[in-house]
Amino acid sequence: MSYPWFEALQSQLYRQVGEQTLHHALLISGIAGLGKVELAQLLAKQLLCQRPIQEGPCGQCHACALFHAGNHPDFHPIKPESRHISVDSVRQLNAKLAERSQQGGAKVALFYDAQMFNESSANALLKSLEEPSDNTFFILVCESVGRLMPTITSRCQKLLIKAPPDCRPWLAEQGFSHVHSGILQLYQGAPLVILGLLQQGRSNEHEQIADGFNQFLDDPSHCFELADFIAKDLTTRMRWFSYLLHDVQKVALGVKDDQWVFVNHKGLLERCARLWPPTVGYHLIQRWLGLTNEFQQHSGLKKELLLGQYFIDLKNQIGGKGAS
Ligand SMILES: [Zn+2]
């Protein structure tokens, strides 16, 4: 499956395959929901196809049939086992890549989640990356290059996939017109994430955080319920709450509601804007971002507790004014 937002990059890569100038190690990165894996698979298929054309793999040859059936012997997909890419899987890969290609063409290794290397599996791959056997290609996919070891990233050509500036025309083609711009912000404009939520009727899920926060303002004993809810899908839901805090600032500063994300929660936003002035709101946002960064850097933190503490502090900061 190809998508319009990476079409230009895709044809550039196909052209390089045709001209035999493709870098032997590619690192495809970008947020979730952009189709990075689909691009990686298309590229692998193009490399293995016996009659590739500029538009892509032919889809007719023996190699394409094998690839489609999921058993091309020169295609080596590596998925993490539980928490890591194991060193054994990399050693087995190295052994296979050292042999001749079974179909007489290219050999392709595709790492579905390159963030899952640990030190030993990353080290096991280094030599192959540095001195690849003939006609061998490595395609690594990850969300954030920063989480990979520099020894790996420095040996790869980095390809960053970005979300399209506005995916609403594409969503409309998929049958979903009138998508609110707030949804784009909440999910960083990632078309496939947003499409998935729309298809499952879940595009209003973020409103639960507004309801939870409203409940907490009524009754602070709900703070750990709210914390638990956020911790269950930490990155996404922390982003939701930061948009809620920003919306409060917008209300306080008189920004029109077409710029809000939580348009359906006017009452809550106005209530918050009465509870704290923009200076306090600024401080709340800064602390929230600080917490987000801490969670990104230290995976072992007790998230529910720290989130709960944040809400208790917020309550203390606005004093006894919580009740509506
Ligand atoms: Zn083919």
Image (tube, rainbow, N blue to C red):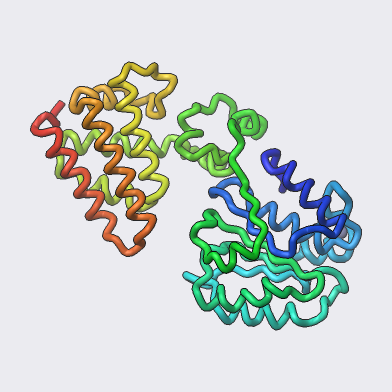
Q: Determine whether, in the image, residue 39 is placed left or right of residue 46.
A: left
Q: Quadrant of residue 122?
A: bottom right
> Looking at the image, which residue is at 68% across and 79% down?
94
Instruction: Report whether 133 appears left or right of 86.
Output: right
- Residue 158 sits in quarter: bottom right
Q: Quadrant of ligand 1?
A: bottom right
Q: Is residue 27 above or below residue 165?
A: below
Closer-to-camera residue (211/146):
146
283 displayed left or right of 57: left
User: Quadrant where the C terminus lies?
Assistant: top left
* Residue 27 in sight from this viewpoint: yes
44 lies above or below 95 = above
Q: Would you say 14 lies left or right of 316 here?
A: right
Q: What residue is shown at x 59% (from left), y 62% (from top)?
A: 153
Q: Residue 299 in the image: state x and y as whole percent.
A: 36, 62
| Front in this rendered view, residue 258 or 137 | 137
Residue that appears at 65% across and 33% down: 170
Residue 6 percent coordinates (x, y): 69, 43
- Of residue 175 and residue 145, the one placed in the foreground of this image is 145
Q: Is residue 180 above or below residue 13?
A: above
The answer to which quarter of the image holds residue 288 is top left
Residue at 36 percent across and 51 percent down: it is 293
Residue 81, x across and y down, in percent: 53, 72
- Give above or below for 173 relative to 14: above
